[in-house]
Amino acid sequence: MKNLYIILSFVAFSYTVTAQNKDTKAADKLFSRFEYVDAAKEYLKLVENGKADGYVYKQLADANYNMFNTKESAKWYAKATETNQDAETYYRYAQMLKAEGKYEDANKQMKKFASASPSDMRAKAFNENPNYIPRLLDKTRLFNVNPSDASSDKSDFGAVLYDNAVYFASARNGARKTYGWTDEPYLDIYKADYNTDGTVTNAVPLRDLNSKWHDGPITITADGNTAYFASESYKEKESEKDKKANARFSQVYLFKATKTGDKWGNINEVSFNDKTFSNSNPSLSRDGKTLYFSSNRPGSMGGTDIWKVAINDDGTYGEPQNLGNKVNTEGNESFPFIADDNKTLYFASSGKQGLGGLDVYQIDLSNGSEASNLGKPVNTEKDDFAFTFNGVKGAGFLSSNRNGNDDIFAVSPICGVDVMIVVTNAKTGEILSNASVSILDDKKNVIATEMSNAKGEVKYRVECDKPYVVQASKDGYEGNTFAVNKSKGPTAKIDAALQPIDVIVTETEIVLKPIYFEFNKSNITQEGAFELDKLVQVMKNNDKMVIMAKSHTDNRGTDNYNLSLSDRRAKSTVQYVISRGIAASRISGKGMGELEPKVDCGKDCTEEQHALNRRSEFLIVK
Protein backbone atom coordinates (compact mmCIF):
# COMPACT_ATOMS: atom_id res chain seq x y z
CA MET A 1 0.00 0.00 0.00
CA LYS A 2 1.27 3.44 -0.85
CA ASN A 3 0.01 5.24 2.26
CA LEU A 4 -2.32 7.31 0.10
CA TYR A 5 -5.32 6.70 2.29
CA ILE A 6 -3.64 6.73 5.67
CA ILE A 7 -3.71 10.45 6.21
CA LEU A 8 -6.99 11.44 4.63
CA SER A 9 -7.92 8.63 2.25
CA PHE A 10 -6.39 10.67 -0.55
CA VAL A 11 -4.67 14.03 -0.89
CA ALA A 12 -6.35 16.28 1.60
CA PHE A 13 -4.13 19.23 2.22
CA SER A 14 -1.64 21.46 0.48
CA TYR A 15 1.89 20.48 1.40
CA THR A 16 4.81 22.63 0.24
CA VAL A 17 8.47 21.72 0.50
CA THR A 18 11.14 24.35 0.16
CA ALA A 19 14.03 23.03 -1.90
CA GLN A 20 17.24 22.92 0.06
CA ASN A 21 19.39 23.62 -2.98
CA LYS A 22 19.44 23.44 -6.75
CA ASP A 23 20.39 19.74 -6.65
CA THR A 24 17.15 18.79 -4.91
CA LYS A 25 14.87 21.05 -6.94
CA ALA A 26 13.53 18.36 -9.28
CA ALA A 27 12.94 15.84 -6.49
CA ASP A 28 11.38 18.46 -4.23
CA LYS A 29 8.94 19.48 -6.94
CA LEU A 30 7.79 15.89 -7.39
CA PHE A 31 7.52 15.48 -3.62
CA SER A 32 5.42 18.63 -3.28
CA ARG A 33 3.07 17.27 -5.93
CA PHE A 34 2.71 14.02 -3.96
CA GLU A 35 4.39 12.06 -6.75
CA TYR A 36 6.37 10.04 -4.26
CA VAL A 37 7.34 7.19 -6.58
CA ASP A 38 9.24 9.48 -8.92
CA ALA A 39 10.43 11.75 -6.08
CA ALA A 40 12.10 8.80 -4.38
CA LYS A 41 13.89 7.92 -7.62
CA GLU A 42 15.25 11.47 -7.89
CA TYR A 43 16.44 11.57 -4.28
CA LEU A 44 18.13 8.18 -4.81
CA LYS A 45 20.08 9.65 -7.72
CA LEU A 46 21.47 12.27 -5.35
CA VAL A 47 22.53 9.51 -2.96
CA GLU A 48 24.22 7.57 -5.75
CA ASN A 49 26.04 10.72 -6.92
CA GLY A 50 27.33 11.56 -3.45
CA LYS A 51 25.14 14.66 -3.12
CA ALA A 52 22.95 13.47 -0.24
CA ASP A 53 22.77 15.01 3.21
CA GLY A 54 20.39 14.84 6.18
CA TYR A 55 17.72 16.71 4.25
CA VAL A 56 17.81 14.29 1.32
CA TYR A 57 17.77 11.28 3.64
CA LYS A 58 14.71 12.64 5.46
CA GLN A 59 12.90 13.41 2.20
CA LEU A 60 13.71 9.94 0.92
CA ALA A 61 12.49 8.42 4.17
CA ASP A 62 9.30 10.50 4.13
CA ALA A 63 8.56 9.61 0.51
CA ASN A 64 8.79 5.92 1.35
CA TYR A 65 6.83 6.50 4.57
CA ASN A 66 4.00 8.01 2.53
CA MET A 67 4.05 4.96 0.28
CA PHE A 68 4.36 2.64 3.31
CA ASN A 69 7.55 1.09 1.98
CA THR A 70 8.54 0.24 5.52
CA LYS A 71 11.94 -1.34 4.91
CA GLU A 72 13.19 1.48 2.69
CA SER A 73 11.65 4.13 4.94
CA ALA A 74 13.34 2.72 8.06
CA LYS A 75 16.64 2.50 6.18
CA TRP A 76 16.61 6.20 5.31
CA TYR A 77 15.23 7.37 8.64
CA ALA A 78 18.25 5.67 10.23
CA LYS A 79 20.46 7.95 8.11
CA ALA A 80 18.26 11.02 8.64
CA THR A 81 18.27 10.75 12.44
CA GLU A 82 22.05 10.90 12.50
CA THR A 83 21.68 14.65 12.00
CA ASN A 84 17.93 15.40 12.18
CA GLN A 85 16.63 16.31 15.65
CA ASP A 86 12.96 16.64 14.67
CA ALA A 87 10.68 14.77 17.12
CA GLU A 88 8.23 13.60 14.46
CA THR A 89 11.05 12.02 12.49
CA TYR A 90 11.90 9.86 15.48
CA TYR A 91 8.23 8.94 15.78
CA ARG A 92 7.90 7.99 12.12
CA TYR A 93 11.12 5.99 12.34
CA ALA A 94 9.69 4.08 15.31
CA GLN A 95 6.49 3.38 13.38
CA MET A 96 8.40 1.95 10.45
CA LEU A 97 10.52 -0.22 12.76
CA LYS A 98 7.37 -1.56 14.39
CA ALA A 99 5.96 -2.29 10.96
CA GLU A 100 9.06 -4.42 10.39
CA GLY A 101 8.51 -6.20 13.71
CA LYS A 102 11.60 -4.60 15.28
CA TYR A 103 9.95 -3.59 18.55
CA GLU A 104 13.10 -3.20 20.63
CA ASP A 105 14.66 -0.85 18.07
CA ALA A 106 11.34 0.99 17.78
CA ASN A 107 11.32 1.60 21.53
CA LYS A 108 14.76 3.21 21.31
CA GLN A 109 13.43 5.71 18.79
CA MET A 110 10.28 6.26 20.85
CA LYS A 111 12.48 7.19 23.82
CA LYS A 112 14.17 9.83 21.67
CA PHE A 113 10.77 11.04 20.49
CA ALA A 114 9.45 11.23 24.06
CA SER A 115 12.55 13.13 25.15
CA ALA A 116 12.22 15.60 22.27
CA SER A 117 8.47 16.13 22.73
CA PRO A 118 7.57 15.20 26.35
CA SER A 119 4.17 16.95 26.34
CA ASP A 120 2.91 14.99 23.33
CA MET A 121 0.14 12.53 24.26
CA ARG A 122 1.94 9.80 22.36
CA ALA A 123 5.09 10.46 24.37
CA LYS A 124 3.18 10.40 27.64
CA ALA A 125 1.48 7.13 26.74
CA PHE A 126 4.84 5.59 25.87
CA ASN A 127 6.48 6.75 29.09
CA GLU A 128 3.62 5.34 31.14
CA ASN A 129 3.68 1.97 29.40
CA PRO A 130 6.76 1.49 27.20
CA ASN A 131 6.53 -2.31 27.07
CA TYR A 132 2.93 -2.61 25.93
CA ILE A 133 3.51 -4.90 22.94
CA PRO A 134 3.37 -8.22 24.87
CA ARG A 135 0.06 -7.15 26.39
CA LEU A 136 -1.39 -6.43 22.94
CA LEU A 137 -0.16 -9.75 21.61
CA ASP A 138 -1.83 -11.57 24.52
CA LYS A 139 -5.23 -9.93 24.03
CA THR A 140 -8.18 -12.24 23.57
CA ARG A 141 -8.96 -12.60 19.88
CA LEU A 142 -12.30 -11.02 19.09
CA PHE A 143 -12.60 -11.60 15.35
CA ASN A 144 -11.55 -14.02 12.66
CA VAL A 145 -9.96 -12.33 9.65
CA ASN A 146 -9.94 -13.93 6.19
CA PRO A 147 -9.22 -12.72 2.65
CA SER A 148 -12.25 -11.42 0.78
CA ASP A 149 -12.94 -11.80 -2.91
CA ALA A 150 -13.92 -8.12 -2.89
CA SER A 151 -10.20 -7.41 -3.38
CA SER A 152 -8.43 -7.00 -6.70
CA ASP A 153 -4.80 -6.54 -7.69
CA LYS A 154 -5.19 -2.78 -7.11
CA SER A 155 -5.99 -0.86 -3.94
CA ASP A 156 -9.38 -1.73 -2.42
CA PHE A 157 -10.58 -0.44 0.93
CA GLY A 158 -13.44 0.97 2.98
CA ALA A 159 -15.90 -1.89 2.44
CA VAL A 160 -19.21 -1.59 4.28
CA LEU A 161 -22.13 -4.04 4.23
CA TYR A 162 -25.72 -2.81 3.95
CA ASP A 163 -28.42 -5.48 3.58
CA ASN A 164 -27.07 -7.71 0.79
CA ALA A 165 -24.77 -5.18 -0.87
CA VAL A 166 -21.15 -4.27 -0.23
CA TYR A 167 -19.88 -0.79 -1.07
CA PHE A 168 -16.18 0.05 -1.24
CA ALA A 169 -13.55 2.23 -2.90
CA SER A 170 -11.25 0.72 -5.50
CA ALA A 171 -8.55 1.68 -7.99
CA ARG A 172 -9.24 -1.40 -10.14
CA ASN A 173 -10.33 0.54 -13.23
CA GLY A 174 -7.11 0.13 -15.21
CA ALA A 175 -8.30 2.23 -18.15
CA ARG A 176 -8.23 5.44 -16.18
CA LYS A 177 -5.38 7.86 -15.62
CA THR A 178 -2.95 6.89 -12.86
CA TYR A 179 -2.21 8.98 -9.80
CA GLY A 180 1.39 9.97 -9.00
CA TRP A 181 1.26 9.12 -5.30
CA THR A 182 0.52 5.44 -5.95
CA ASP A 183 1.01 4.85 -9.67
CA GLU A 184 -2.52 3.42 -9.60
CA PRO A 185 -5.76 4.58 -11.25
CA TYR A 186 -7.99 7.05 -9.46
CA LEU A 187 -10.50 5.65 -6.97
CA ASP A 188 -14.11 4.85 -7.75
CA ILE A 189 -17.00 3.71 -5.58
CA TYR A 190 -18.10 0.14 -6.26
CA LYS A 191 -21.14 -1.90 -5.31
CA ALA A 192 -21.13 -5.71 -5.14
CA ASP A 193 -23.47 -8.52 -4.12
CA TYR A 194 -23.07 -10.06 -0.67
CA ASN A 195 -24.06 -13.70 -0.90
CA THR A 196 -25.39 -16.02 1.78
CA ASP A 197 -22.08 -17.88 1.92
CA GLY A 198 -20.21 -14.63 2.62
CA THR A 199 -18.72 -14.29 -0.85
CA VAL A 200 -18.69 -10.94 -2.65
CA THR A 201 -19.44 -11.00 -6.37
CA ASN A 202 -20.50 -8.83 -9.31
CA ALA A 203 -18.64 -5.66 -8.33
CA VAL A 204 -19.64 -2.73 -10.53
CA PRO A 205 -18.80 0.99 -10.30
CA LEU A 206 -21.52 3.41 -9.19
CA ARG A 207 -21.31 5.58 -12.28
CA ASP A 208 -23.91 8.03 -10.99
CA LEU A 209 -21.55 9.01 -8.15
CA ASN A 210 -18.11 8.54 -9.65
CA SER A 211 -16.18 11.34 -11.29
CA LYS A 212 -12.81 11.56 -13.01
CA TRP A 213 -11.31 12.30 -9.58
CA HIS A 214 -10.98 10.16 -6.47
CA ASP A 215 -14.36 9.01 -5.13
CA GLY A 216 -15.06 7.04 -1.93
CA PRO A 217 -15.55 5.72 0.67
CA ILE A 218 -19.34 5.90 1.10
CA THR A 219 -21.94 5.53 3.84
CA ILE A 220 -25.68 4.98 3.29
CA THR A 221 -28.81 5.55 5.37
CA ALA A 222 -30.81 2.65 6.78
CA ASP A 223 -33.51 3.04 4.10
CA GLY A 224 -30.86 2.96 1.37
CA ASN A 225 -32.01 6.20 -0.22
CA THR A 226 -29.40 8.71 0.95
CA ALA A 227 -25.63 8.46 0.70
CA TYR A 228 -22.71 10.49 1.97
CA PHE A 229 -19.42 9.98 0.20
CA ALA A 230 -15.98 11.53 -0.17
CA SER A 231 -14.70 13.07 -3.36
CA GLU A 232 -12.34 15.82 -4.36
CA SER A 233 -13.06 19.52 -4.25
CA TYR A 234 -12.31 19.59 -7.99
CA LYS A 235 -15.90 18.41 -8.28
CA GLU A 236 -16.88 21.89 -7.05
CA LYS A 237 -14.12 23.51 -9.16
CA GLU A 238 -12.29 24.43 -5.98
CA SER A 239 -8.53 23.97 -5.62
CA GLU A 240 -5.41 25.76 -4.42
CA LYS A 241 -2.62 26.82 -6.77
CA ASP A 242 0.93 25.98 -5.66
CA LYS A 243 3.26 28.01 -7.83
CA LYS A 244 6.45 26.26 -6.71
CA ALA A 245 5.00 22.87 -7.48
CA ASN A 246 3.32 24.23 -10.60
CA ALA A 247 0.19 22.33 -9.66
CA ARG A 248 -3.25 22.67 -8.18
CA PHE A 249 -4.20 20.73 -5.08
CA SER A 250 -7.68 19.77 -4.07
CA GLN A 251 -9.19 19.03 -0.71
CA VAL A 252 -11.36 16.04 0.13
CA TYR A 253 -15.00 17.08 0.41
CA LEU A 254 -18.06 15.25 1.63
CA PHE A 255 -21.09 15.04 -0.64
CA LYS A 256 -24.68 14.00 -0.15
CA ALA A 257 -26.70 12.15 -2.80
CA THR A 258 -30.26 10.83 -2.89
CA LYS A 259 -31.68 7.89 -4.77
CA THR A 260 -34.65 7.88 -7.07
CA GLY A 261 -35.52 4.41 -8.30
CA ASP A 262 -32.19 2.83 -9.19
CA LYS A 263 -30.45 6.13 -9.92
CA TRP A 264 -28.34 8.29 -7.62
CA GLY A 265 -28.68 12.02 -8.16
CA ASN A 266 -29.17 15.40 -6.48
CA ILE A 267 -25.48 15.45 -5.50
CA ASN A 268 -24.54 18.37 -3.27
CA GLU A 269 -21.56 19.10 -1.05
CA VAL A 270 -22.19 19.41 2.69
CA SER A 271 -22.19 22.91 4.13
CA PHE A 272 -19.18 22.36 6.41
CA ASN A 273 -16.69 21.73 3.58
CA ASP A 274 -13.96 24.33 3.22
CA LYS A 275 -11.18 24.80 0.67
CA THR A 276 -8.61 25.15 3.46
CA PHE A 277 -9.08 21.68 4.93
CA SER A 278 -10.52 18.26 4.16
CA ASN A 279 -13.42 16.11 5.35
CA SER A 280 -13.34 12.43 4.53
CA ASN A 281 -14.29 8.83 5.38
CA PRO A 282 -17.93 9.35 6.41
CA SER A 283 -19.92 6.97 8.61
CA LEU A 284 -23.60 7.55 9.34
CA SER A 285 -25.35 6.39 12.50
CA ARG A 286 -28.23 3.97 11.83
CA ASP A 287 -30.77 6.50 13.08
CA GLY A 288 -29.46 8.93 10.48
CA LYS A 289 -28.94 11.71 13.02
CA THR A 290 -25.16 11.82 13.30
CA LEU A 291 -22.42 11.77 10.70
CA TYR A 292 -18.90 10.81 11.76
CA PHE A 293 -15.93 11.71 9.57
CA SER A 294 -12.20 12.44 9.60
CA SER A 295 -10.81 15.89 9.08
CA ASN A 296 -7.76 18.10 9.47
CA ARG A 297 -10.00 21.11 10.07
CA PRO A 298 -9.03 23.78 12.64
CA GLY A 299 -9.35 22.39 16.15
CA SER A 300 -7.81 19.05 15.21
CA MET A 301 -5.28 17.69 17.70
CA GLY A 302 -3.07 16.04 15.11
CA GLY A 303 -2.81 15.56 11.36
CA THR A 304 -6.38 14.29 11.09
CA ASP A 305 -8.97 13.72 13.82
CA ILE A 306 -12.35 12.03 14.11
CA TRP A 307 -15.24 14.50 14.17
CA LYS A 308 -19.02 14.25 14.27
CA VAL A 309 -21.82 16.51 13.12
CA ALA A 310 -25.56 16.46 13.84
CA ILE A 311 -27.94 16.09 10.90
CA ASN A 312 -31.09 18.04 11.65
CA ASP A 313 -34.60 17.01 10.64
CA ASP A 314 -34.67 19.73 7.99
CA GLY A 315 -31.47 18.41 6.42
CA THR A 316 -29.22 21.13 7.77
CA TYR A 317 -26.11 20.40 9.83
CA GLY A 318 -25.00 21.34 13.30
CA GLU A 319 -21.53 22.51 14.25
CA PRO A 320 -18.89 19.77 13.78
CA GLN A 321 -17.52 18.50 17.10
CA ASN A 322 -14.12 16.98 17.76
CA LEU A 323 -14.39 13.63 19.59
CA GLY A 324 -11.65 14.63 22.02
CA ASN A 325 -8.51 13.05 23.38
CA LYS A 326 -10.01 9.65 24.21
CA VAL A 327 -10.16 9.15 20.45
CA ASN A 328 -7.77 11.65 18.88
CA THR A 329 -4.03 12.17 19.29
CA GLU A 330 -1.26 14.26 17.78
CA GLY A 331 -0.99 11.52 15.16
CA ASN A 332 -3.63 10.62 12.59
CA GLU A 333 -7.07 9.19 13.35
CA SER A 334 -9.32 8.26 10.46
CA PHE A 335 -11.83 5.78 9.03
CA PRO A 336 -14.52 6.01 11.73
CA PHE A 337 -17.36 3.50 11.73
CA ILE A 338 -20.28 3.85 14.11
CA ALA A 339 -21.88 0.50 14.97
CA ASP A 340 -25.58 -0.35 14.89
CA ASP A 341 -25.91 0.44 18.62
CA ASN A 342 -25.05 4.10 17.90
CA LYS A 343 -22.42 4.08 20.67
CA THR A 344 -19.59 1.75 19.65
CA LEU A 345 -17.13 3.54 17.40
CA TYR A 346 -14.38 1.76 15.48
CA PHE A 347 -11.56 3.88 14.08
CA ALA A 348 -7.96 3.71 12.90
CA SER A 349 -5.10 5.51 14.61
CA SER A 350 -1.38 5.92 14.08
CA GLY A 351 -1.01 7.88 17.32
CA LYS A 352 -2.17 5.38 19.93
CA GLN A 353 -0.12 2.46 21.17
CA GLY A 354 -0.38 -0.20 18.51
CA LEU A 355 1.47 -2.94 16.70
CA GLY A 356 2.66 -0.73 13.87
CA GLY A 357 1.32 1.62 11.20
CA LEU A 358 -2.40 2.17 11.64
CA ASP A 359 -4.23 -0.02 14.16
CA VAL A 360 -7.99 -0.41 14.64
CA TYR A 361 -9.50 0.62 17.99
CA GLN A 362 -12.97 0.59 19.47
CA ILE A 363 -14.52 2.86 22.06
CA ASP A 364 -17.89 3.07 23.79
CA LEU A 365 -18.89 6.71 23.32
CA SER A 366 -21.67 6.44 25.92
CA ASN A 367 -19.66 5.82 29.08
CA GLY A 368 -16.42 7.78 28.89
CA SER A 369 -14.27 4.66 28.60
CA GLU A 370 -10.85 4.58 26.97
CA ALA A 371 -10.34 3.31 23.44
CA SER A 372 -9.04 -0.26 23.22
CA ASN A 373 -6.86 -1.86 20.57
CA LEU A 374 -8.62 -4.78 18.84
CA GLY A 375 -5.39 -6.80 18.89
CA LYS A 376 -4.49 -9.57 16.48
CA PRO A 377 -5.55 -10.75 13.97
CA VAL A 378 -7.42 -7.52 13.20
CA ASN A 379 -4.22 -5.56 13.75
CA THR A 380 -0.76 -6.37 12.44
CA GLU A 381 2.58 -4.64 12.12
CA LYS A 382 1.28 -3.03 8.90
CA ASP A 383 -1.58 -0.58 8.25
CA ASP A 384 -4.98 -1.89 9.37
CA PHE A 385 -7.98 0.40 8.97
CA ALA A 386 -11.56 0.88 7.75
CA PHE A 387 -13.09 -1.70 10.11
CA THR A 388 -16.86 -2.01 9.61
CA PHE A 389 -19.39 -4.44 11.03
CA ASN A 390 -22.99 -5.31 10.24
CA GLY A 391 -24.65 -6.48 13.46
CA VAL A 392 -27.63 -8.07 11.75
CA LYS A 393 -25.48 -10.17 9.42
CA GLY A 394 -22.83 -10.77 12.07
CA ALA A 395 -20.19 -9.98 9.47
CA GLY A 396 -17.94 -7.12 8.52
CA PHE A 397 -14.85 -5.98 6.68
CA LEU A 398 -11.36 -4.71 7.36
CA SER A 399 -8.85 -3.02 5.09
CA SER A 400 -5.15 -3.73 5.42
CA ASN A 401 -1.89 -3.62 3.51
CA ARG A 402 -0.50 -6.61 5.42
CA ASN A 403 0.09 -8.41 2.12
CA GLY A 404 1.77 -5.44 0.46
CA ASN A 405 -1.28 -3.83 -1.12
CA ASP A 406 -4.52 -2.33 0.19
CA ASP A 407 -6.86 -5.31 0.38
CA ILE A 408 -10.28 -5.98 1.83
CA PHE A 409 -10.61 -8.75 4.42
CA ALA A 410 -13.75 -10.38 5.78
CA VAL A 411 -14.19 -10.32 9.56
CA SER A 412 -16.45 -12.51 11.66
CA PRO A 413 -16.82 -12.36 15.44
CA ILE A 414 -15.36 -15.11 17.54
CA CYS A 415 -18.31 -16.06 19.69
CA GLY A 416 -17.28 -15.43 23.26
CA VAL A 417 -18.79 -15.32 26.73
CA ASP A 418 -17.54 -12.92 29.39
CA VAL A 419 -17.67 -14.96 32.58
CA MET A 420 -17.73 -12.82 35.73
CA ILE A 421 -16.85 -14.71 38.91
CA VAL A 422 -17.58 -13.10 42.27
CA VAL A 423 -15.99 -14.82 45.29
CA THR A 424 -17.80 -14.48 48.61
CA ASN A 425 -18.02 -15.97 52.11
CA ALA A 426 -20.86 -18.49 51.90
CA LYS A 427 -21.96 -17.82 55.48
CA THR A 428 -21.76 -14.03 55.67
CA GLY A 429 -21.87 -12.93 52.03
CA GLU A 430 -18.65 -10.98 52.58
CA ILE A 431 -16.62 -10.20 49.45
CA LEU A 432 -13.38 -12.20 49.31
CA SER A 433 -10.45 -10.47 47.62
CA ASN A 434 -7.15 -12.18 46.79
CA ALA A 435 -8.85 -15.52 46.24
CA SER A 436 -7.26 -17.78 43.63
CA VAL A 437 -9.68 -18.32 40.75
CA SER A 438 -8.92 -20.70 37.87
CA ILE A 439 -10.96 -21.54 34.81
CA LEU A 440 -10.69 -25.02 33.27
CA ASP A 441 -11.93 -26.49 30.03
CA ASP A 442 -14.02 -29.65 29.80
CA LYS A 443 -10.83 -31.76 29.85
CA LYS A 444 -9.79 -30.20 33.17
CA ASN A 445 -6.97 -28.22 31.58
CA VAL A 446 -6.33 -24.98 33.48
CA ILE A 447 -6.70 -22.12 30.99
CA ALA A 448 -5.85 -19.26 33.34
CA THR A 449 -5.56 -18.37 37.01
CA GLU A 450 -6.01 -14.94 38.56
CA MET A 451 -6.55 -13.43 41.99
CA SER A 452 -9.88 -11.79 42.77
CA ASN A 453 -9.83 -8.00 42.99
CA ALA A 454 -11.09 -5.76 45.80
CA LYS A 455 -14.65 -6.48 44.68
CA GLY A 456 -14.04 -10.23 44.74
CA GLU A 457 -14.19 -10.31 40.95
CA VAL A 458 -12.32 -12.17 38.26
CA LYS A 459 -13.38 -11.95 34.62
CA TYR A 460 -12.59 -14.49 31.91
CA ARG A 461 -13.60 -14.57 28.26
CA VAL A 462 -14.30 -18.07 26.97
CA GLU A 463 -15.69 -19.59 23.80
CA CYS A 464 -19.39 -19.98 23.22
CA ASP A 465 -21.20 -23.30 23.48
CA LYS A 466 -18.49 -24.98 25.55
CA PRO A 467 -18.70 -26.05 29.18
CA TYR A 468 -16.10 -24.79 31.65
CA VAL A 469 -15.36 -25.17 35.34
CA VAL A 470 -14.30 -22.47 37.76
CA GLN A 471 -12.15 -23.40 40.76
CA ALA A 472 -11.89 -20.95 43.63
CA SER A 473 -9.84 -21.16 46.82
CA LYS A 474 -8.59 -18.95 49.62
CA ASP A 475 -6.77 -19.55 52.88
CA GLY A 476 -9.28 -20.21 55.65
CA TYR A 477 -11.97 -21.35 53.22
CA GLU A 478 -12.91 -24.61 51.59
CA GLY A 479 -11.98 -24.57 47.93
CA ASN A 480 -14.77 -25.45 45.54
CA THR A 481 -15.63 -25.89 41.89
CA PHE A 482 -18.46 -24.21 40.00
CA ALA A 483 -19.85 -25.21 36.61
CA VAL A 484 -20.02 -22.74 33.74
CA ASN A 485 -22.72 -24.10 31.48
CA LYS A 486 -22.65 -23.89 27.69
CA SER A 487 -23.77 -20.44 26.60
CA LYS A 488 -23.88 -18.14 23.60
CA GLY A 489 -23.25 -15.20 25.91
CA PRO A 490 -22.62 -12.43 25.86
CA THR A 491 -22.17 -12.73 29.64
CA ALA A 492 -22.40 -15.27 32.45
CA LYS A 493 -22.11 -14.72 36.18
CA ILE A 494 -20.80 -17.25 38.68
CA ASP A 495 -21.36 -16.76 42.41
CA ALA A 496 -18.38 -18.55 43.92
CA ALA A 497 -19.43 -18.80 47.56
CA LEU A 498 -16.75 -20.47 49.70
CA GLN A 499 -17.44 -22.08 53.04
CA PRO A 500 -15.16 -21.05 55.90
CA ILE A 501 -13.04 -24.02 56.93
CA ASP A 502 -14.68 -25.79 59.85
CA VAL A 503 -12.90 -29.11 60.20
CA ILE A 504 -13.81 -31.84 62.65
CA VAL A 505 -10.77 -32.35 64.88
CA THR A 506 -10.98 -35.19 67.42
CA GLU A 507 -8.36 -36.17 69.98
CA THR A 508 -6.87 -38.65 67.55
CA GLU A 509 -7.49 -37.45 64.00
CA ILE A 510 -8.55 -34.70 61.61
CA VAL A 511 -11.68 -35.77 59.71
CA LEU A 512 -11.82 -34.77 56.05
CA LYS A 513 -13.95 -35.81 53.13
CA PRO A 514 -12.47 -38.61 50.99
CA ILE A 515 -9.29 -37.67 49.12
CA TYR A 516 -10.02 -39.01 45.67
CA PHE A 517 -7.41 -40.14 43.18
CA GLU A 518 -7.81 -40.96 39.53
CA PHE A 519 -7.82 -44.68 38.67
CA ASN A 520 -4.35 -46.21 39.04
CA LYS A 521 -2.81 -42.78 39.68
CA SER A 522 -1.29 -41.10 42.70
CA ASN A 523 -1.24 -37.41 41.72
CA ILE A 524 -3.35 -35.01 43.76
CA THR A 525 -6.49 -33.85 41.95
CA GLN A 526 -7.99 -30.38 42.37
CA GLU A 527 -10.82 -31.85 44.43
CA GLY A 528 -8.30 -33.59 46.67
CA ALA A 529 -6.32 -30.38 46.98
CA PHE A 530 -9.39 -28.56 48.28
CA GLU A 531 -9.71 -31.09 51.10
CA LEU A 532 -6.01 -31.10 51.90
CA ASP A 533 -6.09 -27.30 52.13
CA LYS A 534 -8.34 -27.78 55.15
CA LEU A 535 -5.68 -29.94 56.76
CA VAL A 536 -3.06 -27.31 55.99
CA GLN A 537 -5.22 -24.63 57.61
CA VAL A 538 -5.66 -26.68 60.79
CA MET A 539 -1.92 -27.30 60.99
CA LYS A 540 -1.16 -23.61 60.48
CA ASN A 541 -3.55 -22.75 63.30
CA ASN A 542 -1.87 -25.37 65.53
CA ASP A 543 1.82 -24.99 64.84
CA LYS A 544 2.87 -27.83 67.18
CA MET A 545 0.62 -30.45 65.61
CA VAL A 546 2.26 -33.44 63.91
CA ILE A 547 0.25 -35.62 61.50
CA MET A 548 0.51 -39.13 60.07
CA ALA A 549 -1.29 -39.55 56.74
CA LYS A 550 -2.41 -43.13 56.15
CA SER A 551 -3.76 -44.17 52.75
CA HIS A 552 -5.96 -47.26 52.36
CA THR A 553 -7.33 -49.18 49.40
CA ASP A 554 -10.19 -51.62 49.01
CA ASN A 555 -9.44 -55.35 48.66
CA ARG A 556 -9.68 -55.52 44.88
CA GLY A 557 -6.31 -56.11 43.26
CA THR A 558 -3.31 -57.96 44.63
CA ASP A 559 -1.91 -57.25 48.07
CA ASN A 560 1.41 -56.00 46.73
CA TYR A 561 -0.20 -53.78 44.10
CA ASN A 562 -2.57 -52.19 46.63
CA LEU A 563 0.26 -51.64 49.12
CA SER A 564 2.46 -49.95 46.50
CA LEU A 565 -0.36 -47.78 45.13
CA SER A 566 -1.47 -46.63 48.57
CA ASP A 567 2.12 -45.81 49.54
CA ARG A 568 2.54 -43.60 46.45
CA ARG A 569 -0.70 -41.84 47.26
CA ALA A 570 0.34 -41.27 50.87
CA LYS A 571 3.62 -39.76 49.71
CA SER A 572 1.82 -37.47 47.21
CA THR A 573 -0.42 -36.33 50.04
CA VAL A 574 2.58 -35.50 52.23
CA GLN A 575 4.33 -33.63 49.42
CA TYR A 576 1.24 -31.53 48.74
CA VAL A 577 0.97 -30.48 52.40
CA ILE A 578 4.68 -29.62 52.53
CA SER A 579 4.30 -27.56 49.33
CA ARG A 580 1.74 -25.42 51.14
CA GLY A 581 4.25 -24.32 53.77
CA ILE A 582 4.06 -27.07 56.40
CA ALA A 583 7.46 -28.26 57.65
CA ALA A 584 8.41 -31.77 56.50
CA SER A 585 9.07 -32.74 60.13
CA ARG A 586 5.37 -32.24 60.94
CA ILE A 587 3.85 -34.72 58.50
CA SER A 588 4.62 -38.24 57.37
CA GLY A 589 2.73 -40.72 55.25
CA LYS A 590 2.30 -44.44 54.96
CA GLY A 591 0.43 -46.65 52.53
CA MET A 592 -1.57 -49.38 54.23
CA GLY A 593 -2.97 -51.11 51.15
CA GLU A 594 -5.91 -53.29 52.20
CA LEU A 595 -4.41 -54.23 55.57
CA GLU A 596 -6.76 -52.16 57.77
CA PRO A 597 -10.26 -52.22 56.25
CA LYS A 598 -12.86 -50.03 57.87
CA VAL A 599 -15.48 -52.64 56.98
CA ASP A 600 -14.22 -56.21 57.09
CA CYS A 601 -16.50 -57.61 54.41
CA GLY A 602 -14.11 -60.05 52.77
CA LYS A 603 -14.97 -61.03 49.20
CA ASP A 604 -18.62 -59.97 49.47
CA CYS A 605 -18.18 -56.18 49.82
CA THR A 606 -20.76 -53.92 48.25
CA GLU A 607 -19.68 -50.82 46.27
CA GLU A 608 -20.55 -48.70 49.29
CA GLN A 609 -18.34 -50.81 51.51
CA HIS A 610 -15.47 -50.68 49.01
CA ALA A 611 -15.77 -46.88 49.03
CA LEU A 612 -15.58 -46.77 52.82
CA ASN A 613 -12.42 -48.85 52.74
CA ARG A 614 -10.77 -46.59 50.11
CA ARG A 615 -9.91 -43.76 52.48
CA SER A 616 -7.24 -41.47 53.80
CA GLU A 617 -6.80 -40.92 57.51
CA PHE A 618 -4.99 -38.03 59.14
CA LEU A 619 -3.94 -39.14 62.58
CA ILE A 620 -2.68 -36.71 65.19
CA VAL A 621 0.69 -38.01 66.33
CA LYS A 622 1.48 -35.03 68.54
Image (cartoon, rainbow, N blue to C red):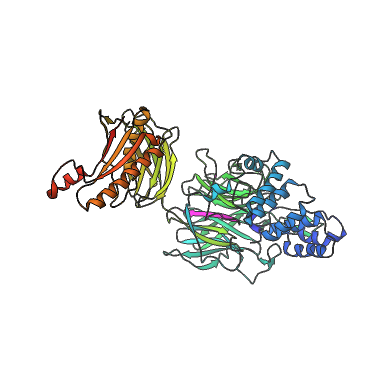
Q: Is residue 36 magenta?
A: no
Q: Which quadrant is the N terminus positioned in?
A: bottom right
Give the image quarter of residue 618. Answer: top left
The image shows residue 136 at horizontal and vertical percentages of: 54, 48
Q: Nearer the viewer, residue 510 or 444?
A: 510
Q: Residue at x 13, y 50 (%)?
A: 603
Q: Residue at x 63, y 50 (%)?
A: 350
Q: Residue at x 67, y 55 (%)?
A: 96
Q: Is residue 374 magenta?
A: yes
Q: Is residue 252 visible?
A: no
When the figure is inspected, residue 388 is found, relative to residue 524, above or below; the finding is below
Q: Is residue 355 visible?
A: yes
Q: Residue at x 36, y 42 (%)?
A: 471
Q: Could you tell whether 40 is left or right of 228 in the image?
A: right
The image shows residue 191 at horizontal and vertical percentages of: 52, 64
When the figure is inspected, residue 267 is found, relative to residue 419, above or below; the finding is below
